[in-house]
Image: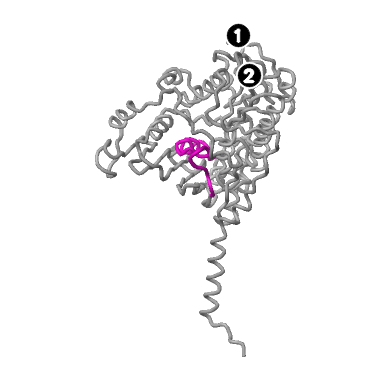
Amino acid sequence: MTPQPTPRRNFLKTLGSLTAGIAAFPAIARAQAATPARPASAKYMGDFAAPKLDKVKVAIIGVGARGSGHAAQLATLEGVDFVGVCDLRESAAKSAHANVTKHGHTPKLYFGEENAWQKMLAETRPDAVFIATPWPLHAPMCIGAMKAGAHAFSEVPIAYTVEEMWQIINTSEATGRHCMMMENVNYGREELLYLNMVRQGVIGELLHAEAAYIHPLCGQMENGDTTGSWRTFQYAKRNGNLYPTHGLGPVAQYMSIGRSEDTFARLVSFSSPAKGRALYAAKSQHLTNPEFKTLDFKGGDINTSIIKTSLGRTIMVQWDETSPRPYTRHNLIQGTRGTLAGFPNRMSIEGVTKGHGEGWAESEEWEAVAQKYEHPLFKRMGELSKKMGGHGGMDFLMLYRIIECLRSGAPLDQNVYESCLWSAVGPLSEKSVAEDGMPQAFPDFTRGNWKTTKPLGIIG
């Protein structure tokens, strides 16, 4: 007679199945992140340095709220020859064109047609194209620019599907052209300072980081034909961390992620309920688009993702552009000898600050340590950057460094693989949220070459 299963036996069988399933999660995630082979003719771009350019012929696509500032600042830089300005809207294109010509440039003007940017590339043959358009256009414009022979510089994120990221990488490797996401926050004073302190071993071996973009932006739904006019629909149809790189880029550089030291391995992600945007739209009397009142907002008000690196380090990444909370990017990096943090700026370091982990050095004490470890680039360019502006000067310093690297034939501070790795948090978090927090593996966009890619140095 066949013995009948007991409740305990059923329980143990179920537990065994669950345990096997949990153990298989990383393997499942790895299978989802298959790495396509690099074509034989392609070139790895991790430490790539393009030939020097005495004059950098610059064109820009998208001169709205963000791009108009980039155009105005690029026009002031030595070694720049502005050859093209393009925007779908005639008024925006003409306004930016006028600002650029004030500095002695004679760029061609393009507007009014969705494919006007392609005409600009063909006619002006720029060396570098700056892209500040809505998110869905970043990848195709980067790819188009590189195929036209130009280096591509895109606003964040570089793309919002993993498939697009592979297309960007394959195009960069095939054409031998840079493609860099313009993560301006990496050029903030505090971020450069903490990078320098980490490189000097001040806080010991790195263990953990925290990054965020918490910025209440519901008001964009009332701001006319600007960012909110298209970004609001992204919040309605997507649920995850849609905008990870402002907080994540700096801490990833502290940890040398995607370079010789470490890389992202996998991610889990959860979102809160979606409440705030519908409530805001319901009470607003000034919405740019009345459709906002009827949108079914899928994206949770706050998303929290946890990244595990190949070395076992952890990174918490949060995103919230909805809730009434004070602005923060966290900017926290923790090591075996201390922790550096932002918003407000604080640090606790063995043998440097008071106590052993009980308190934080703030204000005057923080500034005294900062003066000692100020990044050489900020020492050289910080005052001019603050004067030129753009998020406190970080925009100008970023653009200055791009042109400086192109003119000197040096590798860029951010390579194409980092751009895709940081941006990949977006689609991977969406997939994890949809699967109730299931782990998602990061693609190895470098195809194993991150292990031999030099860490970002301290630029003087």
Q: In this view, does 132 lie to the left or right of 121?
A: left
Q: Residue 165, percent across and down?
A: 64, 39
Which residue is identified by label 1? Answer: 104
Instruction: Determine whether the residue tagged by mark 1 lies in a helix, strand or loop.
Output: loop
Q: Residue 86, percent across and down?
A: 68, 22
In depth, the one of 1 and 230 nearer the eye is 1
Figure quadrant of the N terminus: bottom right
Span of residues in magenta: 243-266
On screen, residue 381 above or below 427: above
On screen, residue 269 above or below 261: below
Q: Which label belongs to residue 76?
A: none
**Which residue sits furthest bottom?**
1
Amino acid residing under circle 2:
Val
Q: Which of marks 2 and 1 is in front?
A: 2
Which residue is identified by label 2? Answer: 58
- In which quadrant of the rendered view does residue 69 lie? top right
Amino acid residing under circle 1:
Gly
Total numbered circles: 2
CA distance for labels 2 and 1: 14 Å
In depth, the one of 433 and 97 nearer the eye is 433
Q: Residue 184, percent across and down?
A: 51, 29
On screen, residue 337 above or below 404: below
Closer to the chain start, of discs 2 and 1, is 2
Image point 68% across, 38% down: which residue? 167
For label 1, the crowd category at 10 Å Cα-Cα, with few meaning under 14, some 14 to 19 and many 20 or more, is: few
Figure quadrant of the C terminus: top left
